[in-house]
Amino acid sequence: MIFHRETKLYFFLRRRLILIFICLTYASAATAAVKEADDTISGVDTLPGWIGAMVGANIPATSGVSPTATAAVTLGSRLGSVFGVGIFGSYYGESSTGPYLGLPSSTAMSVVLLTAQASLFFGGLHFGAETGAAIRSWSGVASTLVGGTASSSTTLIIGIHGGYDYKLSRNLSLGVDGHYFFPGAATEANTAQVLGVVKVWL
């Protein structure tokens, strides 16, 4: 009789211990998953390199050119916990609504911006400075300001940029980027770009 009671107690305790072990294992896995998600979102577990595609709007700070859609790419890498470098390139077409760069009104232009960037990172937030070139081209007309018969111009630009990346996973993020460019030539206008971005982290 005593043996029977001890056997029942043994199986009772064993079932309870198994149940406790399962609960602790589940709780540990859930805690680890939450921590991994928090680290990914906060940037603690961020991979250093990235490549991204962007679409948005180009907004010139002049009445001589109208805003237009733009597409862009970015790639780069963090060199430390808060500092990184990258390359940014964007392309857009624009049409003058008035005299601009010595071109007649309604002249269609293609513009490529290429810059090298230095950035500071704070979690998903990043901002910094950039410098490079703005390459404009047109056809069928001549510019009175750019060599008289030139069909393109290349201008030094400097700028500032900032944005935010929301991590969907360790390797993928969605975000927004903003750029403001100052051209080296007084005949060209300052330009702002606002872009949505998808980045793959490598």
Image (tube, rainbow, N blue to C red):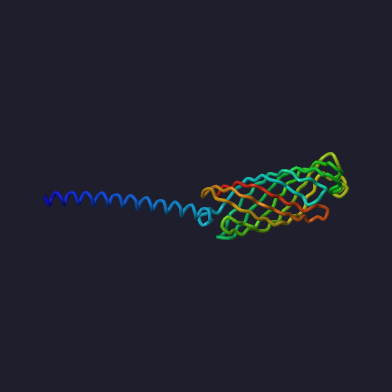
* Percent position of residue 5, x then y: 15, 50
User: Would you say 104 lies left or right of 175 here?
Assistant: right
Q: Nearer the viewer, residue 105 or 115?
A: 105
Q: How many marks?
A: 0
Q: Nearer the viewer, residue 90 or 179?
A: 179
Question: Image point 67% across, 48% down: which residue?
Answer: 195
Question: Image point 35% across, 51% down: which residue?
Answer: 25
User: Would you say 8 lies left or right of 167 here?
Assistant: left
* Percent position of residue 49, x then y: 56, 52
User: Would you say 76 lies left or right of 14 here?
Assistant: right
Q: Nearer the viewer, residue 112 or 197?
A: 197
Question: Image point 46% across, 53% down: which residue?
Answer: 36
Residue that lies at the very extreme toward the top in this rendered image: 140
* Percent position of residue 187, x then y: 83, 53
Task: Let me know if residue 202 appears in the view.
Answer: no
User: Would you say 21 lies left or right of 58 here?
Assistant: left
* Percent position of residue 135, x then y: 76, 48
Question: In which image quadrant can residue 126 be found?
Answer: bottom right
Question: Image point 80% across, 46% down: which residue?
Answer: 65
Task: Let me know if residue 119 appears in the view.
Answer: yes
